[in-house]
Image (spheres, rainbow, N blue to C red):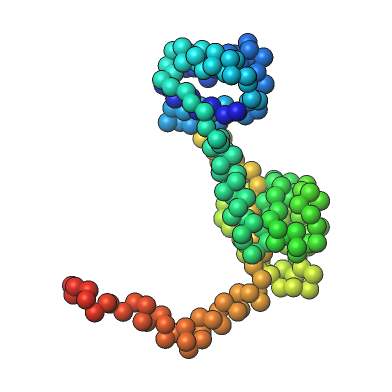
Amino acid sequence: MRLEVFCEDRLGLTRELLDLLVLRGIDLRGIDIDPIGRIYLNFAELEFANFSSLMAEIRRIAGVTDVRTVPWMPSEREHLALSALLVAMPEPVLSLDTKGKVELANPASCQLFAQSQERLRNHPVAQLITDFNIQRWLEGSPLESHSEHVVIGGQNFVLEITPVYLEGEHGERVLTGAVAMLRSTVRMGASAADHDDPGYQRVQPNSRRRPENAPRG
């Protein structure tokens, strides 16, 4: 069960919400806080009477303007969208922590390394990509993306690795890991060949031609 609580920006309001759940013995599974005045709570299903009573008590908290059920937490929706994007990508993509271990791998990565997502999780990337020392690169607190030619299983790839930073408690940038993408040079070459094809060149100018009925500037 997930609730969206509309509220004012009042000090201590979130604490009161959490205390209310503890008082009722409700196990909180997750919480999202939106800076525009919304708090999202995720907890186990309640019986109707307990649920109705909880909703009434939440509305009585000073600063709460409304509360309603929602199907998803914002973080869950973002995670689902990211997962769908990774699944659809033909290129192998790995999400890495600061120690150079795999946190997330898309299906293309599983196919390339012949491993399941479960087996790739927490796997040292140094054992997967040996032509570039990603761990040393991370230890240098990189600020920009880096590209490197690597060979994996006899296939040539361009490794594109990007550092991931979050804002710390005092506004400083904190390195949390990196995202690595492996772009096949064969696929990249095929794409370049398509752009060089005479048929492609004939289509491109036509696509920019002004329609006959378009007004002239």
Q: Quadrant of the N terminus?
A: top right
Q: Is residue 82 above or below residue 171?
A: below
Q: Is residue 122 above or below residue 5?
A: below
Rendered residue at 21%/76% (across/down)? 213
Question: Where does residue 88 sit, x and y in percent of width and height?
Answer: 61, 59
Rendered residue at 75%/59% (across/down)? 110
Quarter of the image for residue 191 reads bottom right
168 left or right of 137?
A: left
Which residue is farthest bottom?
198
Rendered residue at 73%/50% (across/down)? 102
Res 35 seen here: yes
Res 54 seen here: no
Rendered residue at 51%/80% (across/down)? 195
Count of numbered circles in the view: 0
Quarter of the image for residue 173 reads top right
The answer to which of 135 and 150 lies nearer the viewer is 150
105 left or right of 59?
A: right
Question: Where does residue 176 sit, x and y in percent of width and height?
Answer: 64, 43
Q: Is residue 70 above or below residue 77?
A: above
Which residue is farthest front?
48
The answer to which of 48 and 107 lies nearer the viewer is 48
Q: Quadrant of the C terminus?
A: bottom left
Question: Where does residue 200 sit, x and y in percent of width and height?
Answer: 47, 83
